[in-house]
Image (cartoon, rainbow, N blue to C red):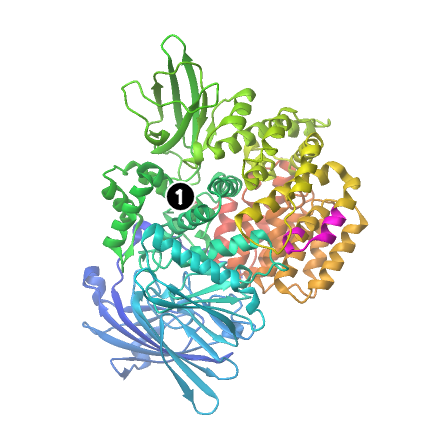
Amino acid sequence: MKTQEPRAIFLKDYRLPPYLIDAVELDVHLAPSATEVTSRLSLRPNDAAGKASHGPLVLDGEKLELISVAVDGRVLEKREFSLSDKALTIAKPPAHAFTVRIKTRCDPQANKALTGLYRSGTLYCTQCEPEGFRRITYYLDRPDVLAKFRVRLEADSKEAPVLLANGNLVEEGTVGAKRHYAVWEDPFPKPSYLFALVGGQLGHIADTFKTRSGRTVALRVYCEPGKEDRCAWAMESLKASMRWDEQRFGLEYDLDIFMIVAVSDFNMGAMENKGLNIFNDKLILARPDTATDDDYEAIEAVIAHEYFHNWTGNRITCRDWFQLCLKEGLTVFRDAEFTSDLRSRPVKRIADVRFLRSSQFAEDSGPLAHSVRPESYIEINNFYTRTVYEKGAELCGMIMTLVGRDGFRKGMDLYFKRHDGTAATVEDFVAAMADANGIDLDQFMLWYSQAGTPELTCRFTYSQDSKTAKLTVKQEQRPTPGQLKKKPLHIPLRLGLLSSQGKDLPLTLADGTKVKDGVLQIRKRAESFTFTGIEERPVTSLLRGFSAPVRLDANWSDRDLEFLIAHDSDLFSRWQAAQSLAMKSLLAMVATVRSGHIPRPSPRFGKAMAHLVADETLDPAFRAEMLTLPGENDIAMALGSDLDPEAIHKARRAFRVSLGKSLRDVLQTIYDRYEVKGNYSPDPESVGRRTLRTAALSLLTIAGGRQSIPRLREHYKQAANMTDQMVALRLFTEQETPERQRIMDSFYRRWKNDALVLDKWFALQVVSPLPGTIDRVKELLKHPQFAMTNPNRVRSVIGAFAMGNPVQFHAPDGSGYKLVSDAVIELNGFNPLMGARLLSAFETWRMLEPKRQKAAKQALEKVRGAENLSRDVFEIASKMLGETETAA
């Protein structure tokens, strides 16, 4: 059966809900294949909706068996309501406040989409964002309907001894000899997407947190029994998050208990359900022998993110799903600030910009380009994107750059004062920032509606006679799907002018204005700024701290870049200068490879790095970033068209070999000196030392070739934690040696019964750039421990291959494309959300050279032509092929 093309939903068509729900009482009787849910909804017409408030009551519902429906205590006859596979419609509801009582049955065991109520092993759990609650009961399943929930859970005492839901526990007891119940009450109105329940056999650890007002909050982290010893870091991260939000934003937690539950089958990373956060267990469980530094930092950041949602997402939620960036972009910004305050601000900024450029900029440049607040969508699941999250966070960062840190806090305070307890819009947030700081942000709103990455061209001249320096800035916005013409944006450009001694010069404009915090506000397509009192020709430091998510053409000479690397007071700009210098050489090397010659990198980068990486006054983590070249995706984005991923890979590898050889002595010194001895700790200093040592080992290994294998073998043997083990294993994936497979097999035998560590084992093998990797991926898909129904395993094999192995995914014969497209078609049948997300690996297919482009298109057409295509996969495949422009 061919897919009937679904219709798009448009922001311009938003209408107020015709009915509101003030209170919800749920009675949930849990059973693996026949859970019964009785809901009692207290409704009233929404007078603000006009005539619609006197029309039919349409309640969303999917995959439900309706048992009965009653209005104000009277059971309705079949002729009084209608039922479809998407909704329950009551034709003539009362014209006043009324109650609806609905009894339904659902099958958690059969729910492989992992949305709504489903089973993860023997555990009952839920995922209701964005539209999963309609799989639990019939409801007005939209974010602008807020209600208070009282939930009674009942289950077999042995099967589910732990019963959890949102809010505070108000009652519990037994029902006969074999069953028990628990009643949870949430005093704060919330939309249905924030509903959660969990039932099953769970272990936990407990702690408390005293709020700034003196209240004691009970804290619980639940997990699979026997894994409680892996929850300590999650608990520490939660307490750090609560403390930081009070100190930085004055926000105190508002319930008596805060709970986190780790589950092994979860489509997302985590979910901020009010008071009951449900997490993918890989973002909770950590022990030094099972988790890496990156795992520890991810746990810390994601726990903070979901906790911060309590205010930016829960207390103030989204009016509609087009406003998704209102909660996600803002909360990503908040969790980035949290990590920056706890760890290294420059290193965190560099990490965020690396991801933004390689990932979100790619989204902006392809067929999936859309604005931070899109104007339309077919399936809302497809807009949990890098643009909404990461670029949405950048917009918040730009506002803070414009108004200052204290001004941003003032804006947040006003935002909470105005909108606490409501479903808000982007306009509400920006207006609070503008009003609190007396700044005009009308033009800034274009950032939310215009797709694509702006391009800034900066040119600099100096006059010795007048002692003035002139900066000319031009901005350009290229066409994106559905948006051919763009308006100029309001762009904060942070800069500095450096003297020949590397000192920052005062910034005074020709009219006498002092440039506050070094920030220029660019509002026109082209404008110039003249700085006075400049005694010598300075070197410009532009886009400090990455003050706006733009591409920058600054026309620096190699000498300018070397000067900035050595002297810039802004560490991000020093890193950016290094990236620019390396990229110049890399682009030339790619062209050399494609012409059939041996690529030879410029020695300038190695010389610029030699002194810097040996400078022990600098943070080790920052020095490690300076040693890390632009990635293959970065190079591809810089080239922009006619891409040959194999040539890119060869050029970058040759550059790494050259850099490792030129810095061999200093790298060996770092490797020997920066070993972290004693018990493992994820503190910033220890992580920084390990990271720098890893960077040194990586370059020494690739430069040494086979001669480096004994050192690598010894590093693996001496590893006292998973971080050091994984470093060695990852470097072995680049080595053509029989020892590689022997070590992989040994690692598997040790960890085959630990799912999260085994995910690492799977992922390591599929990201190998070596020939034969595609055949190895096919073998792993048949491995007894691989399951297409488990999202973590899908991400560790198919996702890691498609997103993390460009040279093999883009194999010239199209075999990589076929492997991934076949998996998408299979996932479409039971978990379309996962299938659609894998398709994003194809987003740069139009940039490829003709042969690969043709093969990628054929794979996409195969997906688009598959039978019974879901809305999720249909939308992404259609956009990839240019068949729809609903992303505009």
Res 680 → quadrant: bottom right
Query: Between residues 164 and 230, which one lies in front from this camera angle?
Result: 230
Image height check: is 678 above or below 557? below
Whether residue 736 is visible here, answered yes or no, is no
Q: Which residue is drawn at 39% across and 38% down?
A: 483
Res 590 → quadrant: top right
Q: Position of residue 73 (x, y in %)?
A: 26, 83
Q: Where is residue 509 in the image (x, y as percent from the top left)?
A: 31, 21
Q: Position of residue 575 (x, y in %)?
A: 53, 33
Quick one: which residue is furthest to the right in this view?
Answer: 738
Q: How many labels does the image show?
A: 1
Query: Between residues 204 and 612, which one lies in front from this camera angle?
Result: 612
Q: Quadrant of the N terminus?
A: bottom right
Q: Quadrant of the C terminus?
A: top left
Q: Determine whether, in the image, residue 692 is placed left or right of residue 519.
A: right
- Amino acid at dot 1: Ser
Image height check: is 363 above or below 468? below
Is 298 colored magenta in this rendering? no
Question: In the image, which residues are magenta?
Answer: 712-724
Query: Between residues 204 and 68, which one lies in front from this camera angle?
Result: 204
Q: Determine whether, in the image, residue 543 is placed left or right of residue 409.
A: right
Q: Read off the residue under disc 1.
A: 371
Q: Which residue is drawn at 44% across and 85% down?
A: 180
Quick one: which residue is furthest to the front in this view?
Answer: 678
Q: Position of residue 265 (x, y in %)?
A: 54, 66
Q: Determine whether, in the image, residue 582 is placed left or right of residue 454.
A: right
